[in-house]
């Protein structure tokens, strides 16, 4: 009985030793093995691994995936002395596990350091930009992409050799204004809108003038063409009238002479018109009796009322 109990104790001790000597690394982790606090090896392959039992060696697991966090919002002063409050996000990944472990140790410490670093770079970089380059109705004037790229490059120059990590991306997540500049921003945006509206009105007026001028030109062309056609038609009508009159005259010349004389009377004898003419004039042929002797003068007075 005593031997059996002793065997169970020995087996229990062996199981504890084995349990303390085996650890598992999954695919998303890297393990730093330290012996009495000093790193002795790095395990990057997933699966079970062995180490010295107990307190002699310790397993420190690091997540090798891309991490994303949001640093605290920071108030900054721009080049034109306008203050803004900016919030960004940072994506980072461990590139040198040993250096990262020695310099920072944990993810929480790493993100605290990175947050301070990014906010410091934001303050330096944004001091070179105007408010109109941060927020503007014209997207071509906004320089946020250039600002993000510049901060990313400057931060990576420091983190690679100092912390054993790489910043994958830095993005500006939100920009707000202290109450002191809210009215100024509103007035600037209102002014931009008014300028844009004025531009559209001017362009519309110019387009309307062009359309009106084109319409006037087309009307003039149409009227000129119509007048030309009317003159042609009138000329053709006059020619036809002359032809018909000539044919009629050849058939009844005395009648047309009489009608011509009447037309002449109508033209020269207006209201209260008096003419003194020689009786020898052909004008009297249809006004005097046929048996009257021609000679002397006659007084003709218009009786038209």
Image: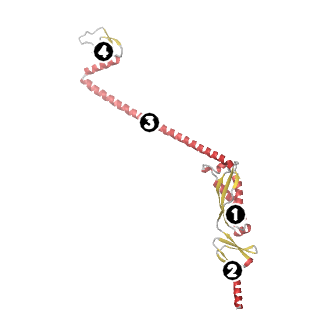
Helix, strand or loop at disc 3?
helix
Cα distance in 3D space between marks 4 and 3: 50 Å
In the rendered structure, find residue 111 and report the number of the disc placed on it: 1
Nearest to the eye among marks 3 and 2: give it. 2
Q: Which of the two discs, 1 and 3, labels the residue nearer the N terminus?
A: 1
Nearest to the eye among marks 4 and 3: give it. 3
Percent x, y for residue 16?
70, 81
Vertical relation: 205 (above or below) 178:
above
Image quadrant occupied by the N terminus:
bottom right
Vertical relation: 200 (above or below) 108:
above
The image quarter in which residue 273 lies: top left
Q: Which of the two discs, 3 and 2, labels the residue nearer the N terminus?
A: 2
Cα distance in 3D space between marks 3 and 2: 101 Å
In the rendered structure, find residue 219 and report the number of the disc placed on it: 3
Q: Which of the two discs, 2 and 4, labels the residue nearer the N terminus?
A: 2
**Residue placed under numbered mark 4 in the picture:** 283
Nearest to the eye among marks 2 and 4: give it. 2
Taking the image as shown, residue 144 lies to the left or right of residue 39, namely: left
**Residue placed under numbered mark 2 in the picture:** 19
Nearest to the eye among marks 1 and 3: give it. 1
User: Cβ–Cβ below 8 Å for labels 4 and 1?
Assistant: no
Percent x, y for residue 297?
31, 9
Q: Determine the residue positioned at 70% across, 57% down.
A: 119
């Amino acid at each position: 009985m005593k031997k059996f109990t002793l065997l169970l104790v020995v087996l229990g001790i062996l199981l504890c030793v084995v349990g303390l000597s085996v650890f598992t690394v999954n695919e998303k982790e890297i393990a730093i093995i330290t012996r009495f606090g000093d790193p002795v090896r790095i395990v990057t392959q997933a699966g079970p691994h062995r180490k010295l039992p107990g307190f002699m060696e310790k397993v420190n697991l690091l997540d090798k995936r891309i991490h994303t966090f949001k640093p605290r919002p920071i108030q900054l002063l721009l080049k034109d002395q306008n203050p803004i409050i900016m919030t960004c996000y940072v994506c980072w990944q461990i590139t040198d596990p040993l250096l990262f472990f020695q310099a920072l140790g944990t993810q929480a410490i790493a993100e605290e350091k990175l947050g301070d670093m990014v906010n410091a770079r934001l303050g330096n970089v944004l001091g070179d930009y105007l408010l109109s380059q941060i927020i503007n109705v014209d997207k071509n004037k906004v320089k946020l992409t250039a600002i993000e790229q510049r901060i990313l490059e400057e931060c990576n120059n420091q983190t690679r050799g100092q912390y054993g990590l790489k910043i994958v991306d830095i993005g500006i997540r939100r920009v707000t204004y202290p109450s002191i500049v809210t009215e100024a921003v509103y007035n600037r945006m209102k002014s931009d809108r008014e300028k844009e509206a004025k531009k559209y009105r001017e362009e519309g007026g110019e387009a309307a003038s062009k359309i009106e001028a084109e319409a006037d030109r087309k009307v003039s062309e149409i009227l000129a063409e119509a007048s030309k056609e009317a003159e042609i038609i009138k000329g053709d009508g006059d020619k036809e009238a002359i032809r018909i009159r000539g044919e009629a005259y050849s058939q009844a010349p005395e009648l047309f002479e009489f009608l011509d004389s009447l037309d002449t009377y109508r033209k020269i004898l207006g209201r209260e018109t008096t003419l003194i003419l020689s009786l020898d004039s052909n004008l009297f042929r249809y006004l005097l009796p046929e048996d009257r002797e021609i000679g002397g003068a006659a007084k003709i007075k218009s009786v038209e009322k």
